[in-house]
């Protein structure tokens, strides 16, 4: 009797960049003959790709490790592998806390996951692993869109961030490699390419390229089957005239994800960030003037050391005036060893939470207002699939909504044919209802 292939459950935590690394590991393991399962309790091998960016992410990873080891004790035998940023940040302490884990894999060696499982010689790298267009990869995102990672690491000096210490300095992939991968993704049915990195607007600087992101976008426009191109996480002070000019191209989503982090100049100075509130508002106005209908998303941090009542009120006024389409608010997480560590963590957790809630309550009203302004409009929508509770209702996104972080559009497809055939396609949808974060509509034409 032929021996069954070992099954692997690979669970990815954290950001979109982590997800791409997980997809690369899936590609390598698929080529090595492993089968996959979504049920960690039933799998022979459990791989956890962790995030180590802030304490809540590390707490989530620790809980996942404990769950995997419980399965190993009660549903074994199993092999448990823990990978990713948390391992890179704190491998020795984790190994002491969880001696039952069979193997540890940091961010420098994702490509050696097959050798690790086969107990073959391991050759540690000195730099964080950065995949190429010819690296195997198995997509795990819904049909129709995929992430396209263009670089690894970060060379910024934001005082609150540990990414440069974990992943090292910024390294760009060559434009040719990115375009080749984009063509391969498009051949698989990907219609929306979502460009990700730790610092997308710095793309190509390490390669000596001027306006590197603009040059990359221009090259990606030649991938005919890709109908939408979106880039995520750009630095506000790098949104240039040349970048806004190319974003006027029809295939590039008029969507900017530009984390301002705060608005008060004193807080920004401590953060190691630029663009205080008045300059940031001028940038927002410039974007909307140059790109009518553009959607702007930002992220903000509350409770950073030095943020008192006056500084927080400045942040509230900034959000009120900017009227962002999408907003994420995070409580400051103290990180020992980060440049901000000497400032301590003087703002109490309860104060951080109240400030976060206040900002999100303000943003809820703004978001609802902006969504209501779309009532009656007709927008292109990428259909991601059917709702689990109603097969004739589909879930999709417009070009003004990024995957996984923004709202969605619930689409009535009762008169539009087979829902399965619509998945992964772009359809014209008339917006008929608006909630705080999500929209509803019907397919037309």
Image (tube, rainbow, N blue to C red):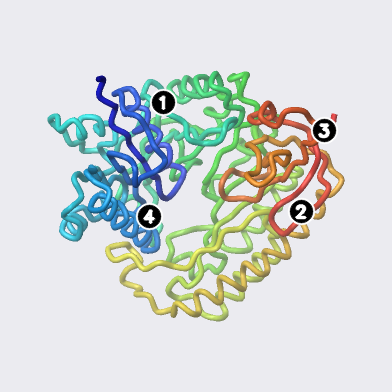
Report the disc number at residue 371. 2
Which secondary structure lies at badge 2? Answer: helix
Q: Read off the residue under disc 3.
A: 415
Mark toward the viewer: 3 or 2: 3
Spatial CA distance of label 4 from label 1 is 24 Å
Spatial CA distance of label 4 from label 3 is 53 Å
N-terminal-most mark, 4 or 1: 4
Residue 136 sits in quarter: top left
Q: Is residue 290 left or right of residue 195?
A: right
Q: Is residue 192 left or right of residue 334?
A: right
* Relative image position of residue 64 (x, y in whole percent): 34, 55
Mark toward the viewer: 1 or 3: 3
Residue 397 in view here: no
Q: Is residue 381 left or right of residue 359?
A: right
N-terminal-most mark, 1 or 2: 1
N-terminal-most mark, 1 or 3: 1
The C terminus - image quarter: top right
Mark toward the viewer: 4 or 1: 1
Mark toward the viewer: 4 or 3: 3
* Relative image position of residue 201 (x, y in whole percent): 50, 41
Q: Read off the residue under disc 4.
A: 157
Residue drawn at x 60%, y 19% is 222
* Relative image position of residue 24 (x, y in whole percent): 37, 32
């Amino acid at each position: 009797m032929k021996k069954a292939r070992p099954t692997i459950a690979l669970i990815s935590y954290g950001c979109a960049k982590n997800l791409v690394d997980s997809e690369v590991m899936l590609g390598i393991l698929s080529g090595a003959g492993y089968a996959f399962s979504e049920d960690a309790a039933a799998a022979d091998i459990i791989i956890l790709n962790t995030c180590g960016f802030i304490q809540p992410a590390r707490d989530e990873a620790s809980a996942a490790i404990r769950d995997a080891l419980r399965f190993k004790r009660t549903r074994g035998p199993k092999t448990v592998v823990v990978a990713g940023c948390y391992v890179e940040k704190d491998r020795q302490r984790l190994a002491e806390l969880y001696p039952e884990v069979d193997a540890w894999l940091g961010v420098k060696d994702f490509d050696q996951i097959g050798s690790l499982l086969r107990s073959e010689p391991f050759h540690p790298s000195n730099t964080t692993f950065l995949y190429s267009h010819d690296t195997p990869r198995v997509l795990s995102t819904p049909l129709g869109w995929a992430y396209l990672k263009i670089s690894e690491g970060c060379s910024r000096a934001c005082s609150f961030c540990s990414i440069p210490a974990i992943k090292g300095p910024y390294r760009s992939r060559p434009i040719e490699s990115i375009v080749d991968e984009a063509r391969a993704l498009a051949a698989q049915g990907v219609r929306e390419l979502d460009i990700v990195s730790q610092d997308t607007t710095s793309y190509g600087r390490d390669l000596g390229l001027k306006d590197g992101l603009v040059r990359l976008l221009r090259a990606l426009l030649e991938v005919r089957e890709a109908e939408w191109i979106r880039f995520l996480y750009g630095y506000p002070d790098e949104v240039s005239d040349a970048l806004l000019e190319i974003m006027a191209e029809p295939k590039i989503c008029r969507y900017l994800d530009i984390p301002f982090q705060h608005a008060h100049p004193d807080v920004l100075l401590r953060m190691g960030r630029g663009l205080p509130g008045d300059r940031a508002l001028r940038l927002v106005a410039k974007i909307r003037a140059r790109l009518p209908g553009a959607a702007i998303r930002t992220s903000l941090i509350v409770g950073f050391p030095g943020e008192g009542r006056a500084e927080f009120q400045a942040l509230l006024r900034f959000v009120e005036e900017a009227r962002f389409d999408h907003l994420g608010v995070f409580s400051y997480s103290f990180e020992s060893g980060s440049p901000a560590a000497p400032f301590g963590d003087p703002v109490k957790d309860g104060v951080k939470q109240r400030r976060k809630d206040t900002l999100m309550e303000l943003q809820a009203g703004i978001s609802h207002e902006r969504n209501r302004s779309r009532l009656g409009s007709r927008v292109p929508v990428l259909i991601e699939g059917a709702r689990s509770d109603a097969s004739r209702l589909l879930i999709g996104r417009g070009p003004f909504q990024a995957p996984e972080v923004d709202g969605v559009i619930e689409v009535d497809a009762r008169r539009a044919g087979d829902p399965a055939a619509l998945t992964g396609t772009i359809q014209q949808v008339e917006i008929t209802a608006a909630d705080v974060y999500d929209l509803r509509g019907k397919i037309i034409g």
